[in-house]
Structures are given as C-alpha cells and as structure tokens.
Image (tube, grey):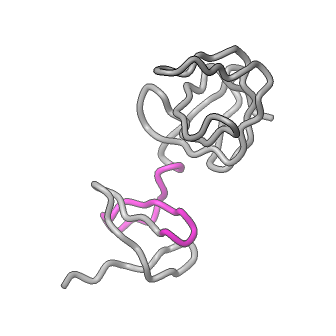
Amino acid sequence: MNELPSCPECKGTYTYEDRNLLVCPECGHEWTGSGDARSLADELVVKDANGAQLEQGDTVTVIKDLKVKGSSAVVKVGTKVKNIRLVEGDHNIDCKIDGIGAMKLKSEFVKKA
C-alpha cells in the first residue's frame, strides 16, 4: 500500500488523493503531490468586483441579486458569505449560503467584506 505524505500545514496523517491533489481532511489544506508544498490557493489568484484579491476563508458580500439555477430562490444583494473556498473554473468560489446550501459563485458578483 502506498504511504501518502502527512500534511505540510498541520502534520495530519489522514491525507488522501483527490484527482491530482493531496488533501488533508483535518485542516482542509490542498497541495500537489509533486514534492512542493504549495497550496492551490497560493497558485490561484481570484479578485472580487473591486479588484481586491480574495483568499481561502474570506468573508464576501453579494453585490447583485443572483438567481439560483434550477430553483425559484434568489440570493439577495448584501448577503454575507463566510468561509469561502477558491477553486479553478468559471465559478471560482465554493461556499455555503444560509437558507440555500452549497453554491458556486463567480467572483465578479461579490466584494470582500
């Protein structure tokens, strides 16, 4: 059985592979398995509607009413979203919104709180 390295952030031993990344379920740190301990967030630059750089765990505020696809729900202007997670792709913010659940947002529709 292959031994995976422990987490470079918290030294946790319960790491697992997710596609081409290694993930620590204890602290949520993600890194590539190529020997460098840089996290995905260090490589990924995401900016909000005002040009401020967003980071993992930031709190943001929605600046426009957003319709939830496949539902009649709407995320209203001014909704605060805590503890965001940055990901690659068109919708580059993963988050959980109270009353709606897990969502992906575009960074152009939020501002750093």
* Magenta stretch prevailing secondary structure: loop
* Residue 70 is a magenta residue: no
For the magenta stretch, what is the residue range? 25-42
Residue under the point 47% across and 69% down: 24
Q: Is residue 84 above or below residue 62?
A: below
Q: Is residue 79 above or below residue 20?
A: above
Q: Position of residue 10 (x, y in %)?
A: 57, 76
Q: Position of residue 4 (x, y in %)?
A: 32, 78
Q: To which quarter of the image does residue 9 belong?
A: bottom right
Residue under the point 67% across and 23% down: 75
Q: Tell me the quarter of the image containing the N terminus.
A: bottom left
Q: Position of residue 107 (x, y in %)?
A: 59, 26
Q: Is residue 56 above or below residue 103?
A: below
Q: Tell me the quarter of the image containing the C terminus.
A: top right
* Residue 36 is a magenta residue: yes
> Of 102 and 111, which appears nearest the observer?
102
- Horizontal side of 82 relative to 33 (left or right) equals right
Q: To which quarter of the image does residue 63 belong?
A: top right
> Of 86 and 36, which appears nearest the observer?
86
Residue under the point 28% across and 83% down: 3
> Of 62 and 97, which appears nearest the observer?
97
Q: Is residue 101 above or below residue 15?
A: above
- Horizontal side of 5 relative to 7 (left or right) equals left
